[in-house]
Amino acid sequence: MTDDALAPLRRQFDLTWALFEYHLERLEPQDHLWEPAPECWTLHLRDGVWVPDFAEEEPDPVPAPTAGWVGWHIGWWWSTTIELLQGRDPLPPEAVRWPGPEGAAEWLRSFRGRWIALLPELDPDAPAPFPWPEGTGHTVTDTVAWVNAELMKNAAEMGQLRILRAAGAPGSR
C-alpha cells in the first residue's frame, strides 16, 4: 500500500488509539472483572486459562460486559481481522487467550503493534475478507475503517466501565 492510500484512516486510528490509551494507562487489575450488572459477560479462570462468556447467537437482552470481557473481545475481533488479512484462518473464540488483569493492557497494545506493521503490506482495493460476507463489494479499506470504528466503540465501553467503577457505582467497592 502506498504511504498515503490510507493516511486519513491511519490518522483516525492514531486518534482512537490515543483515546483508548488514556483508559489503558488508568486501568487497575480490579477494574477488569468488576461486574456492572446482575446479567454480565465476564471471564472465568478455569485450570489456569481465562475463559470468556460467549454465545454464537447474541442473547436479547445482551448482558453487560466487564472491562475484561471487552478487552478479550477486542483481542478476538482484532486477531481474526489480522489473520484473515494475512490469508490465514482465524482462531476460534475459545482459542483467543486473554492474559488476565495483570497482562491485559500489554496484550491489547500488542495488537496495535501487529496492526501498524500490517497496514503497509495491505492492498487497500483488495476484496475484504472480514467482517462482511464475500461478494459484498467491501474492500480492505472498508475493513481498516471498520477496525477504527470497532476500536472506538470498545474503547468507549471499556472507559465507561472504568469510570463507573472509579466513581463508586453500586457494587464497585
Image (tube, rainbow, N blue to C red):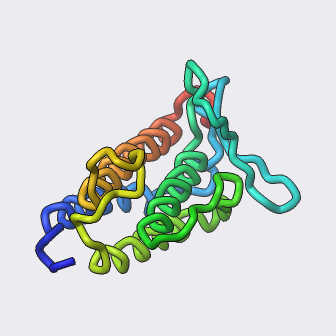
Instruction: Specify the quadrant that holds the C terminus.
Output: top right
- 69 in relation to 19, above or below: above
Q: Nearer the viewer, residue 31 or 7?
A: 7
Is residue 94 found left or right of 123 in the rendered image? right
Residue found at the very far right of the displayed protein: 47
Residue found 41% across the figure and 67% down from its top:
85
Residue 144: percent from left, percent from top: 29, 59
Q: Nearer the viewer, residue 86 or 34?
A: 86
Residue found 62% across the figure and 57% down from its top:
29
Is residue 2 found left or right of 106 in the rendered image? left
- 39 in relation to 140, above or below: above
Q: Nearer the viewer, residue 147 or 107?
A: 147
Q: Nearer the viewer, residue 56 or 52?
A: 56
Is residue 103 found left or right of 113 in the rendered image? right
Q: How many marks?
A: 0
Residue 121: percent from left, percent from top: 31, 79
Residue 44: percent from left, percent from top: 76, 47
Residue found at the very far front of the displayed protein: 135
- 119 in relation to 145, above or below: below
Instruction: Specify the quadrant that holds the N terminus.
Output: bottom left
Q: Quadrant of residue 24?
A: bottom left
Residue 4: percent from left, percent from top: 11, 74
Is residue 39 found left or right of 120 in the rendered image? right
Residue found 63% across the figure and 50% down from its top:
30
